[in-house]
Image (cartoon, rainbow, N blue to C red):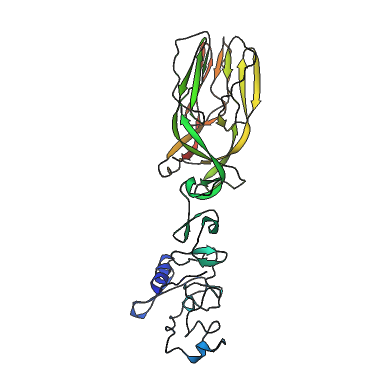
Amino acid sequence: MGHPFFLRLGVAIGLASGLALGCANGQVIPTGDAGIDAAPPPDAGADAPSTCSDKVKDGTETDVDCGGACAKCANGLHCSQPMDCKDVVCTNGICGACGPNTVCPIGQTCIAGFCAACETNADCNGQICNAGSCVPCTLSSECASGEVCNYGTCTAGTQVSMYQCPGMVSLGGGAWGFYGCQNQLTNTPTCYEIESPTTQTFNCTYTGKLDLVTSSAPAPPGTTAVPMYQCPGPVSLGGGSWGFYGCQSQITNTPTCYEIEYPTTKTFNCTPVGTMMLASTPPAAPPGGKSVPMYQCPASVSLGGGAWGYYGCQSQITNTSTCLEIESPTTQTFNCTAVGGIPLEP
């Protein structure tokens, strides 16, 4: 599983780990899990001891015919110091063996307990294989089908296209109103408004893709796992004197949505679709994507009753820092609390 490795690369690794010793003639001998290194053995060649080819472990050898004054040992063979090994890694007396604190040679990673170049993402335990090394993902397109890039780790999940909707627009007044356009970031490409009897649908602008994790993977450091739900579209309750339609096919953090066709009110269940990983502070935008600050809005609050109502505060986590409620003729804007942010991929 190992690859030929030059002394210069071993020197670079030793320096990078901050564990190196200076030697005569400008040499630097790296250290590793095996402890402080001794001087490197001479190259095995024409001057190698005759014991280096007798198929017996003898002399200064650390394994049969290798190590010590003989040729360097391949991965998996015994060693007493990194310089006994072809890849200059000696961990617990085994060449190329690696653990959590092992610095593998450049272009290699710790795979199944040994330093080796990765070949596919499957070698990388959630990271991606790049030029032989395992590195964090930056976009879900780097992961396998059915996975999303969850803050550097490929995790089972799905992507949802998100749209930025316009703010509330007056339709000229009417007997009552429903205002589904509130500058919100949502998974629906349109929003609609009513100022009865006038109704109008508005287009929302594509903004990016939201990653939803569908496995039970723990939240990455600095994030909170927020369960998300797919709500149904508006459903007629039989008509009434005015309406509020809180079910708009939206993906939201609330497991229910509710509708009013006054005097009838009904709550509908929304379906679990995955988990949104909410960073405690707005994260860095992924390449070509965006970082969106998010806010936790309060639940609907009674304003004292009125001729009709619009209830824009529904305990939702959203990109708007305020929410609006109406119990006509009373209107009140409520502040939502900053709770961090989410990345949107392009």
Which residue ends up furthest to the bottom in the rendered image?
Answer: 50
Q: Can residue 332 be spotted in the picture? A: no
Quadrant of the image containing the C terminus: top left
228 and 206: which is toward the camera:
206
Q: Is residue 138 visible?
A: yes
Q: x and y percent of residue 60 in the render?
A: 51, 86
Residue visible at 49% across and 91% down?
Answer: 50
Task: Give above or below for 164 relative to 24.
Answer: above
Q: Nearer the viewer, residue 309 or 338?
A: 309
> Which of the 4 image quadrants contains residue 19?
bottom left
The relative height of residue 262 versus residue 297 in the rendered view (above or below) is above
Which one is in front, 290 or 139? 139
Residue at image point 57% right, 66% down: 113
- What number of labels is visible? 0
- Look at the picture and state if 3 lies above or below 56: above
Q: Name the residue furthest left.
A: 25
Q: Residue 262 at x, y = what percent?
A: 62, 12
- Could you say where residue 6 lies in the image, as x and y percent from the top left? 41, 73
Q: Position of residue 267 (x, y in %)?
A: 65, 23
Q: Residue at x 47, y 70 (%)?
A: 3
Above or below, 196 against 107 in this view is above
